[in-house]
Image (cartoon, rainbow, N blue to C red):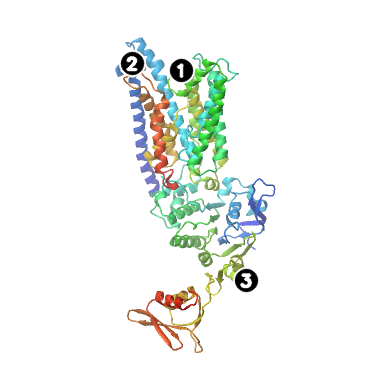
């Protein structure tokens, strides 16, 4: 078959890009490992990674317990935010949908605020000596908050075809949840308020290996759900009516996306704080790069690109050569906000809203 | 008696708007769709054509009565089962970029591929064949958003064909198309049913095209009643004219077209032949004259069509006045200055 062959050829080109992206990820990870307020030669980093002797103890500590977990967290966050952004853009059929813009992060923040400052968890969850149950509780609170807001937006905004209207909806939900957070802050003890406000700046550091033992399986499992979704998500590209007449169970797909995307954005928000714009930008980069809307390709693409973008953003946030570390949200917003403006301005016709 | 592929029994259609009774658009509908037929659903705007099609395709629940596919009720089908009974093409253009024609048509195989959407060689053959049916072979790797509206709608029809359903339902597939696009899509539907035995049900506003290609009309009146019959029968019975009755607009039974009822300026005797006569007649009707065949007893205005080396000449003869015109434009503008209220 000519077509099948063509498809194989195209896939060949595209898997080439995927491999390149994989290499790029390794490069940014290596760069990120070497950069930082303390200069550690690459040779010594390699030694630490492979457990060889002859490296200063303080360097071993910096790499093993600071830089490595931070990079793993950044990779997880990038993968999760990119993937949930893609799912939401397809589900809402809106190029601007993403956890941050739609206020779903605010929902997660509210969940976290309740967990940190709420009465039931008096100890506060951000004290380093956390247990697994506490971590899971935090993830659950954030995911639940995210899920509730997303379900609300689905209810209200599903029939809204105008992306700008959806933006306003997200903005309103964001305002409503931050009002509730403010209320919580008003009635909370100062040290809890401080813990919350540090969290709300967003950061990849500060997540411990113990916490990663919870975060890694949660993220990988939720990404695993995605392996079953490309077919349905592709059908949804034609619109709900077409998808139904092709035999898609739209309600079930929407539930799966709702659960998956809520856990992905909720878990990351719980541990890293609200991180903006990675979710909206990464799917667009992927579509541009691969010139396709096919989720079979887009899903691995957003996972890889998300990881690259997050690790790179963290690198910029380190301000190499200085002692300062910027909140990660500052970096993603500085680059991301113009990106969203560009998406809004360039889409002249709706027909190309999902195109390159 | 053949059994219909699709039948409705006392079907009641409409939207449920939270109100207890809902918004009933049509009721007591008893319709039949037979294998290989090309049926056009026609009726004025707002009669409920889309509501009916959405109900028949299971996108909208019925308010009462039954839709039967074979001898099984529509409500008893799962979405997946229904997908191999009915495939659909909708009015609005799809909003998708960065997708090739091949990828889009391959979506028609959705009900047949597994969880991971792996296409077999047979699936690709069906895709190829569907593109052939709609005459778009060679478009496989073209981007969908770069096609013309007509081509894109044909790709959607190919996608529906790739679904290999027993019935193809289309909701005003030509609404967004230019005239050549409309003609070619309607011809395609006609061909699919006539030459490939596909059962096609489409709603349309292109009455002229529909009348020339449909086996049957489902004529839907504004009060939600549907009369079924051959287009010609419906015209002869007067039902067609009645459903589309409007002020100022009348259906000309003689030429099968709608015309704007204008002022009546009287009769013209027209003498001539061939296509020039046909178009002269149209020009005269446009300014309000009714045209009679030339006859010896012609009184009043007469127009003779003559030819010379450089083209046609129209000669107006009126009692003792004779004038020659070299284009229909000048003829018509002369006649308009003649009329008292022009």
Query: Which numbered mark, 2 or 3, is in the foreground of this view?
Result: 2
**Quadrant of residue B271 within the rendered picture:** bottom left
Residue B10: % across, % down: 68, 56
Q: How many labels sit on residues?
A: 3
Mark pair 1, 3: CA separation? 84 Å
Badge 2 or badge 1: first in the primary sequence: 2
**Quadrant of residue A14 within the rendered picture:** top left
Categorize mark 1 by other alpha carbons within 10 Å: few (<14), some (14-19), many (20+).
some
**Quadrant of residue A107 within the rendered picture:** top right
Direction from residue B237 to residue A36 in the image, left or right: left
Both on one chain, marks 1 and 3? no
Mark pair 2, 1: CA separation? 20 Å
Between residues A171 and A148, which one lies in front from this camera angle?
Answer: A171
Both on one chain, marks 2 and 1? yes
Between residues A311 and A229, which one lies in front from this camera angle?
Answer: A311
- A221 in relation to B60, above or below: above
Mark pair 2, 3: CA separation? 93 Å
- B111 in relation to B38, above or below: above
Q: Mark 3 points at which residue?
A: B237
Q: Name the residue under label 2.
A: A38
* Chain assignment, label 2: A
- B117 in relation to A143, above or below: below
Categorize mark 3 by other alpha carbons within 10 Å: few (<14), some (14-19), many (20+).
few
Residue A208, numbered circle? 1
Q: Which residue is rendered at x = 59% and y = 70% of the image? A: B235
Residue A142: % across, % down: 53, 26
Query: Which numbered mark, 2 or 1, is in the foreground of this view?
Result: 2
Residue A161, numbered circle? none
Residue B204: % across, % down: 53, 60
Whether tag 2 and tag 3 are in contact, CB under 8 A, the answer is no
């Amino acid at each position: 078959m000519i077509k099948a062959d063509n498809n194989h050829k195209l896939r060949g080109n595209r898997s080439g890009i995927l491999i390149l992206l994989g290499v790029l990820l390794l490069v940014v990870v290596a760069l990120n490992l070497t950069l930082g307020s303390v200069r550690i030669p690459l040779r010594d980093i390699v030694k630490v990674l492979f457990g060889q002797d002859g490296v200063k103890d303080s360097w071993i500590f910096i790499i093993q317990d600071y830089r490595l977990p931070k990079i793993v967290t950044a990779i997880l966050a990038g993968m999760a935010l990119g993937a949930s952004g893609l799912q939401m853009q397809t589900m809402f059929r809106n190029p601007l949908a993403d956890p941050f813009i739609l206020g779903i992060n605010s929902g997660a923040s509210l969940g976290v605020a309740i967990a940190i400052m709420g009465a039931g968890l008096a100890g506060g969850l951000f004290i380093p000596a956390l247990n697994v149950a506490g971590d899971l509780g935090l993830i659950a609170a954030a995911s639940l908050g995210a899920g509730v807001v997303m379900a609300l937006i689905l209810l209200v905004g599903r029939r809204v075809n105008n992306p700008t209207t959806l933006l306003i909806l997200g903005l309103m939900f964001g305002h409503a949840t931050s009002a509730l957070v403010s209320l919580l802050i008003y009635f909370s003890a100062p040290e809890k308020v401080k813990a919350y406000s540090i969290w709300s700046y967003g950061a990849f550091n500060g997540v411990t290996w113990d916490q990663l033992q919870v975060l890694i399986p949660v993220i990988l499992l939720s990404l695993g759900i995605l392996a079953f979704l490309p077919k349905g998500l592709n059908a949804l590209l034609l619109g709900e009516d077409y998808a139904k007449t092709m035999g898609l169970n739209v309600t079930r797909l929407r539930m799966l996306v709702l659960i998956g995307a809520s856990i992905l954005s909720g878990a990351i928000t719980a541990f890293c704080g609200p991180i903006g714009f990675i979710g909206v930008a990464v799917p667009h980069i992927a579509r541009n790069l691969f010139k396709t809307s096919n989720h079979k390709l887009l899903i691995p693409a957003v996972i890889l690109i998300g990881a690259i973008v997050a690790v790179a953003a963290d690198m910029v946030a380190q301000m190499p050569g200085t002692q300062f570390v910027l909140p990660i949200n500052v970096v993603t917003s500085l680059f991301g906000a113009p990106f969203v403006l560009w998406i809004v301005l360039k889409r002249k016709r709706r027909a190309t809203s999902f195109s390159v | 008696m053949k059994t219909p592929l699709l039948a409705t029994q006392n079907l009641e259609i409409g939207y449920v708007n939270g109100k207890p009774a809902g918004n009933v658009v049509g009721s007591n509908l008893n319709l039949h769709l037979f294998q290989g037929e090309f049926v056009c659903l026609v009726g004025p705007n707002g009669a409920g054509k889309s509501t009916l099609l959405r109900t028949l395709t299971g996108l909208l629940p019925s308010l009462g009565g039954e839709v039967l596919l074979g001898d099984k009720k529509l409500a008893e089908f799962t979405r997946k089962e229904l997908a191999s009974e009915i495939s659909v093409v909708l009015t609005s253009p799809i909003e998708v970029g960065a997708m090739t024609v091949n990828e889009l048509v391959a979506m028609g195989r959705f009900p047949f591929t597994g969880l991971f959407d792996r296409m077999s060689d047979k699936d690709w053959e069906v895709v190829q064949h569907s593109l052939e049916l709609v005459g778009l072979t060679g478009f496989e790797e073209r981007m969908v958003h770069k096609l013309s509206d007509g081509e894109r709608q044909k790709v959607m029809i190919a996608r529906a064909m790739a679904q290999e359903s027993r019935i193809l339902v289309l909701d005003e597939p030509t609404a967004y198309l230019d005239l050549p696009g409309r003609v070619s899509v309607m011809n395609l539907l006609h061909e699919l049913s006539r030459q490939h035995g596909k059962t096609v049900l489409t709603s349309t506003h292109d009455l002229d095209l529909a009348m020339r290609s449909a086996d049957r009309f489902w004529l839907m009146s504004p009060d939600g009643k549907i009369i079924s019959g051959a287009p010609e029968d419906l015209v002869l019975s007067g039902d067609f004219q009645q459903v589309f009755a409007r002020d100022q607009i009348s259906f000309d039974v003689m030429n099968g077209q709608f015309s704007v009822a204008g002022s009546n300026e009287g009769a013209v005797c027209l003498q001539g032949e061939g296509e020039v006569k046909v178009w002269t007649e149209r020009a005269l009707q446009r300014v309000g004259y009714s045209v009679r065949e030339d006859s010896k007893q012609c009184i009043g205005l007469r127009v003779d069509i003559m030819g010379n080396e450089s083209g046609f000449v129209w000669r107006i003869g009126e009692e003792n006045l004779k004038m020659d015109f070299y284009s229909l434009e000048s003829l018509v503008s002369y006649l308009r200055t003649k009329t008292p209220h022009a």
